[in-house]
Amino acid sequence: MSALSTLLGDKLTGKDGEIATDTALAGKGAIALYFSAHWCPPCRGFTPKLAEWYKKDLSGKGLEVVFVSSDKDEASFKDYYGEQPWLALPFNDRAKKDALSKKFKVQGIPAVVILGPDGSVITKDGRAAISQDETGTEFPWRPKSFDDIFGDAVLKGPSGDVKGSSLKGKVFGLYFSAHWCPPCRGFTPKLAEWYRNDLQAKGFEVVFVSSDKDEASFKEYFAEQPWFALDFDDRKRKEQLSDHFGVEGIPSFVIIDKDGSVITKDGRSAVTGDPTGAEFPWYPKPVADLKSGPGSLNEVATLMVFCETSDEVAKKAIEDTLTPIAKEYLEKAKAAGEEDPELAFTLVTSAEGLSERIRGMVSLPALEEGSKLAPKLILLDIPDKGGFYSGPDGEISAEVVRKFLADYAAKTLTRQQLE
């Protein structure tokens, strides 16, 4: 069985009925999974364009498309698929559709995930890739590496221009910001102060990547900043960097390690929480604390231990228990080239912030003044349409945690729905 048939199932729906997956996709240079639905207006706008590009150029280049439907019933699916010239995942295999959406973190439609013939991910932003290259000149749209994008970039600095490659071997942050953005104008002077006082001396560098509307605004804003900036005229590279790191809002601060890998995309929180750089370069901890923010809670299934009323010694013991298990998941993800681990780990140590809200969502009792509750395991799987699994409470040992995770992997736990 090929990787693609393992991923998509043995059979796909074609225009003339079912067809074996391996037969349908044999010899294809890339496969685009098209997550879409008839009830979705942006989908109905994109589908005819994609169909036109497919028939005119992309099919001939070796692209196959597999429609993965979010339609509400089979009649709607058939009506919508009737407009499409490619293959489809069988509509009645809803479990496979849900598994694909979860695997590729599809949170909105239309979405296009492009796979290689071996089932590996080429890009999860296939919609943008195809829309920018309708004839397939750059097929199969393999994204450029960070080094490819950044290495020969011109950076304006206090002592003159340098190349992006000059920062290789240093830890630095890409600061996506703009003068017109009020939160940016609030954060920039703080970051500049922290940089001058402590962070620059630690060996940390910053590169301003501007979203200003014109060069005059860029120059005025950059004059307040003591670090480097991407040449404002290089708008294409700016967009490539934004796309590469999935920047959807500003200010955004991506911290890059000495080898060019990403330390964290939430550098703003990392630096704000440690402005003197005591924990520089801010490698994410294997076990997060909810009081520092939600982290990847919305994107990654997360094992949570609610221990708000435990004493500090007990909380530290739980963290020590979880840490080696969490590291196993991180190392497995890194070895596979995955950005996120299959499972994240979070402690809930404080009743403030999100704790109370999530307690209610997973039907745990509200905390009252003076209450003393045993630690409780919950596996929160928001990517799976807001599912969660209730685990044991009491002693949190490695054996207890591993048994709970093994039962989750074996699908023997009862899935519950977030309230």
Image (cartoon, helix red, strand yellow):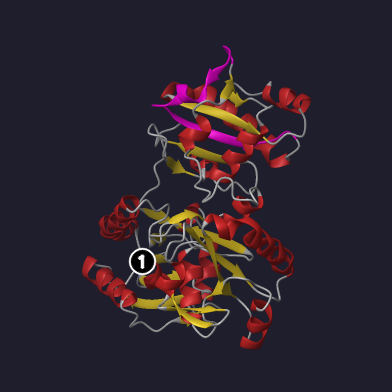
The extreme left residue here reads 399
Q: Residue at x 66, y 79 (%)?
A: 82
Q: Position of residue 81 (x, y in %)?
A: 64, 77
Quadrant housing residue 229: top right
Q: Is residue 47 left or right of residue 162?
A: right
Q: Position of residue 406 (x, y in %)?
A: 28, 73
| SS at badge 1 | helix
* Residue nearer the viewer, 265 or 201: 265
Q: Is residue 132 left or right of residue 355?
A: right
Quadrant where the N terminus sits is bottom left
Regarding residue 87, the answer to whether it shows in the image is: yes
Quadrant housing residue 379: bottom left
Q: Position of residue 190 (x, y in %)?
A: 60, 32
Q: Position of residue 277 (x, y in %)?
A: 44, 32
Callout 1 environment at 10 Å: few (<14), some (14 to 19), or many (20+)?
Answer: few
Task: Give the extent of the magenta segment.
Answer: 158-179
Q: Is residue 283 left or right of residue 131?
A: left
* Residue nearer the viewer, 170 or 266: 170
Regarding residue 372, the answer to whether it shows in the image is: no
Instruction: Please give the residue where the numbered disc 1 appears in the rendered image.
Output: 3
Residue 370 within the segment the image draws in magenta:
no
